[in-house]
Amino acid sequence: MINFEALFKLSYGLYIVSSGDISKGNGFISNTFFQVTAEPARFASCCNKLNYTAELIQKTGAFSVSVIHQDTSADIIGRFGYKSGSDFDKMEGMKVRYGETGVPIVLNDAIAFLECKVIQKIDVGTHWLFIGELIQAELLDDTKEALTYLYYRQVKKGLAPKNAPTYIDKSKLETRESTIKAAKYKCSVCGYVYDDAVEKIRFIDLPSDWICPICGSEKEDFIEL
Ligand SMILES: Cc1cc2nc3c(=O)[nH]c(=O)nc-3n(C[C@H](O)[C@H](O)[C@H](O)COP(=O)(O)O)c2cc1C
């Protein structure tokens, strides 16, 4: 038996993993970035093969990781975590520095950053696991707390989309009694709240292709409050 609720007890951070160069840079929100060895300092980043950033990491052989703080804006999470850079320039208007390898480093809401050179690429199915050796790291702000995946889920009421390695289909989670009474659902991208009590149709009865009237996010991007 697998109780998928148990997987929510695992701990992760939350980062912006970026790659590319000055002409075309891109990044994605990731909770699966972690250190794997101390000497030399090596790190792993698990990146969906369909992410536009995966293409850039393979092209440049390097990536940067911005450690974002707890009050990171929904704009930043939405831009890097729910949209693909194949459709628009994610770095436009961002505060960006370029690393020793030329990869962009997002500084918005960042309290530290790391830069890694890829030394190995492991095929784990839907995702690549990029192993990177640390070539640069800098502390930007020691006064703020780093955002964790737990804080993002519990306090910010955020979700991970389908292509995140830790995505869990809602049908696999135990259904709660509250789904039958009027409830409120919040868009994890823009914060819009759908309130069953004031709408004609209950949220759970909306068609699966229904989208957020404010930002166009999918129904599955909503979290019950
Ligand atoms: C909380 C959160 C965690 C995520 N973690 C990962 C991750 O670890 N690996 C991954 O490939 N995608 C992850 N994603 C999804 C990507 O950020 C998302 O698909 C992004 O739009 C890809 O951007 P790109 O196509 O421009 O590279 C996560 C998204 C969110 C919101």
Image (cartoon, grey):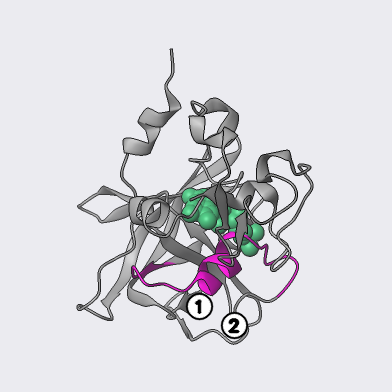
**Kind of residue sitting beneath label 1:** Gly
Q: Which mark is residue 222?
A: none
Q: Residues within 10 Å of mark 1 (few under 14, many from 20)?
A: some
Residue at 45% across, 55% down: 157
Residue 25: which quarter of the image? Answer: bottom right
Residue 68 forms part of the magenta stretch: yes
Mark 2 vs 1: CB contact within 8 A? yes
Q: Residue furthest top?
A: 1
Mark 2 or mark 1, earlier in chain: 2
Q: Is mark 2 within 8 Å of ligand 1?
A: no
Q: Residues within 10 Å of mark 2 (few under 14, many from 20)?
A: some
Please provide percent x and percent y for residue 163. Answer: 60, 45
Task: Residue 133 in the image: state x and y as whole percent.
Answer: 35, 58
Q: For the residues marked 2 and 1, what is the alpha-carbon distance in whole angstroms?
A: 7 Å
Question: In the image shown, does 27 or 9 lie closer to the viewer?
Answer: 9
Secondary structure at numbered mark 1: loop
Numbered range of the magenta stretch? 65-88
154 horizontally vs 163: left or right: left
> Which residue is located at x 48 percent, y 51 percent?
225
Residue 105 as seen in the image, left or right of residue 112: right
Q: Secondary structure at mark 2?
A: loop
**Image spot of residue 87 (x, y percent):** 75, 68
> Between residues 199 and 10, which one lies in front from this camera angle?
199
Relative to 100, say whether 68 is above or below. Answer: above
Q: According to the image, label 2 marks what residue? A: 22
Placement of the N terminus among the 4 image quadrants: top left
Relative depth, front residue between 86 and 201 = 201
Vertical arrangement, residue 196 with respect to residue 156, above or below:
above
- Residue 102 shows which numbered tag? 1
